[in-house]
Amino acid sequence: ADLRLVVEERLREYQEAYLDAFRSGTELGTWLENRPILAMLNETLFVHGGISQHGTALIDHFGVEGVNSLFREHSGDATVGAFVEGTREGQIIYDLLTFRGNHQDGACEDLPRLLPEGVSRLGVGHTPGSAVRVGCSDTFLALDSSLGRWFRNSGNEYCPGLTKVVSSNGRYVCETINKQCEGQIVKLTAAGGVEMIE
């Protein structure tokens, strides 16, 4: 048998099994479909990607919980594609997950007018780095999962972390995760301040 064909078939099986774990109706799929895409804490709006003027208008119109509910209504396998690609609200919500304009040079000038009513700071993910970045006079927080121990240790590789593992050919090594926390903590104060805790 052609080994390449066997590997391709096995890869298709693994990919399908992976996707099946996240499908609507599964425990993990249902949990993911019900996660909020926006969160508010101490006048800080947290989004994955960023915010544009259209995102601001949508949040001002529906509110944070209203936008989360709107997405949850359409987040299933059978409906999310049509919602994101075929509706204005879906396209705007997709932007909240992927927009990168708040990270660009000159974005600090635009940020105050982009913040929805009642919001004084924007916290975004989707910004890999080794440190939290606070900018735009404390109104912009660039946060990401790469600050965590697991990601710092092995990136996107799937390593067990509790013990060192070496592949049979010795080229692939998963180191043991450091038990001490790494990264940074940002404390958001009720008075609207940002405090870095090392």
Image (cartoon, rainbow, N blue to C red):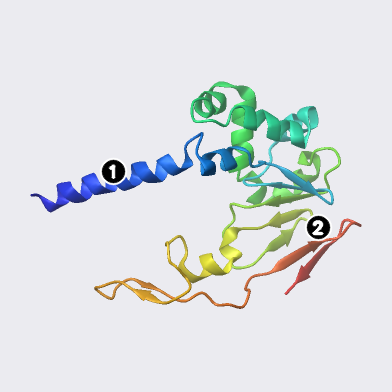
> Residue 85's x, y, as percent?
53, 26
Q: Is residue 191 above or below residue 153?
A: above
Residue located 74% across and 59% down the image: 135
> Residue 9's x, y, as percent?
22, 44
Q: Is residue 56 left or right of residue 21?
A: right
Q: Residues within 10 Å of mark 1 (few under 14, many from 20)?
A: few
Q: Which residue is mark 2?
A: 137
- Asked whether 167 or 97 is in front, the reply is 167
Q: Residue furthest left?
A: 1
Q: Which residue is mark 1?
A: 12
> Residue 75's x, y, as percent?
57, 32
Q: Nearer the viewer, mark 1 or mark 2?
A: 1
Q: Residue furthest right?
A: 191
| Dot 2: element | loop
Q: Which mark is residue 157?
A: none
Q: CA distance from mark 1 to mark 2?
A: 49 Å
Q: Residues within 10 Å of mark 2 (few under 14, many from 20)?
A: few
Q: Earlier in the sequence, mark 1 or mark 2?
A: 1
Residue located 63% across and 27% down the image: 73
Q: Is residue 71 above or below residue 87?
A: below
> Residue 186's x, y, as percent?
75, 64
What type is the residue that disc 1 sits on? Arg
Q: Is residue 100 above or below residue 157?
A: above
Residue 112 figure quarter: top right
Residue located 69% across and 31% down the image: 69
Q: Is residue 92 left or right of residue 53?
A: left
What type is the residue that disc 2 sits on? Ser
Q: Is residue 72 left or right of residue 26?
A: right
| Dot 1: element | helix
